Amino acid sequence: MRTTDLFAALGAAAALFAGANAQEPALINKPGSAEPIILPREIEKSDKKATMIIRAQNGAQFDVYIDGTRLGLTPIRGDIPTGTRLLTATAESFAPIIEPVRIVEGDPIEIVLPNEPLTPAIMPRITQNIVSALQAQPNNQHVSLMASMTATDDADAMRMLSRAEQIGQPSPLSLLLQGRRLQLDRSYDASLAALDRGLALDPNYAALHRQRARTLTQMDRLEEAVVFASKAIDLDKFDWNNHYVRGRILVQMKRPELALQEYRNALVLLPGNQLVISAIEEAQGATPQAEPAQQEAPKGE
């Protein structure tokens, strides 16, 4: 079985797509090989399949698609049609994955997705990869949703979300983004309705539970909010954002000592996160005999 670590491949994704568009050879991150491949202009059709296993590096939950068709949440094991395929994966707290993969009959492949924080420093690369992916597969709904997730301009985010909704049926991710947008617009009931539609499609989607907790918090329905935040952690304990959101709710519930524990969990998962460190300092101010924030050292994975 081939095992592919996508850390190196992410940086080369734009070059891969550029090569495909120009019909020039492009390289896939295949350990021990520099075999050239070309990403087809149209999605290949094939009756042959091979087994693919997809998991995240530290167990976090990613939403995974092949050529715009949703496979589900990691970890995933399934039979994928052979040929050159576009693998895309999203997790709200991490950088999106955009990677061409070659599926060969009788050659199982395991793909390990990196948990790379989505920071301003990598946004130019991510943006270029998304643009290249849209050029290669303009009707790929998931890539349009990626563009909406990472857009820095509200108008662009809305435009790409609308584009995605026109391409295909609502997905858990599209309803998550819709719910988040409605929450920001203070349309709280509509936000909850969108999120509930998403949960009807996939009740194990942790980010939907987390966003529902955020919306309920804005409505001052804290007892309900903490239940959904806890459910998000149950489904994905490896996403720092789940712990952070539950901590924020617990602070508002006047339970800073429990909030501190959630913030500590978040800091273990993403060491040095200034948002979490600031939240720790805030919670410590309401907790007698708390340790200084700078002493909150990662405990290991």
Image (cartoon, rainbow, N blue to C red):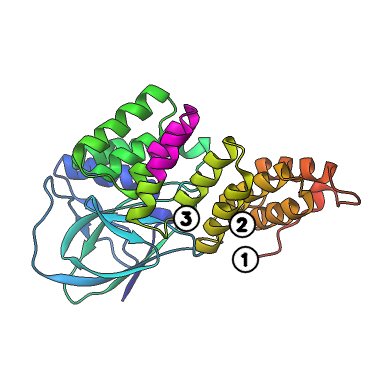
Q: Which residues are magenta?
A: 176-195
Q: CA distance from mark 3 to mark 2?
A: 16 Å
Could you tell me if the residues under marks 3 and 2 are in contact, i.e. CB atoms within 8 Å? no
The residue under label 3 is which amino acid type? Answer: Ala
Residue placed under numbered mark 3 in the picture: 206
Residue placed under numbered mark 1 in the picture: 301
Horizontally, residue 76 falls left or right of residue 235, namely left
Residue placed under numbered mark 2 in the picture: 269
Across and down, in percent, residue 86 comes to: 24, 52
User: Alpha-carbon neighbours of circle 1 within 10 Å: few (<14), some, or many (≥20)?
Assistant: few
Could you tell me if the residues under marks 2 and 1 are in contact, i.e. CB atoms within 8 Å? yes
Q: CA distance from mark 2 to mark 1?
A: 7 Å
Q: Residue at x 39, y 67 (%)?
A: 75
- Of the numbered discs 3 and 2, the one sitting upstream in the chain is 3
Circle 2 sits in a helix, a strand or a loop, which is it?
A: helix
Horizontally, residue 98 falls left or right of residue 227, namely left
Q: Quadrant of the C terminus?
A: bottom right
Q: Nearer the viewer, residue 166 or 31?
A: 166
Q: CA distance from mark 1 to mark 3?
A: 20 Å
- Look at the picture and state if 197 lies above or below 183: below
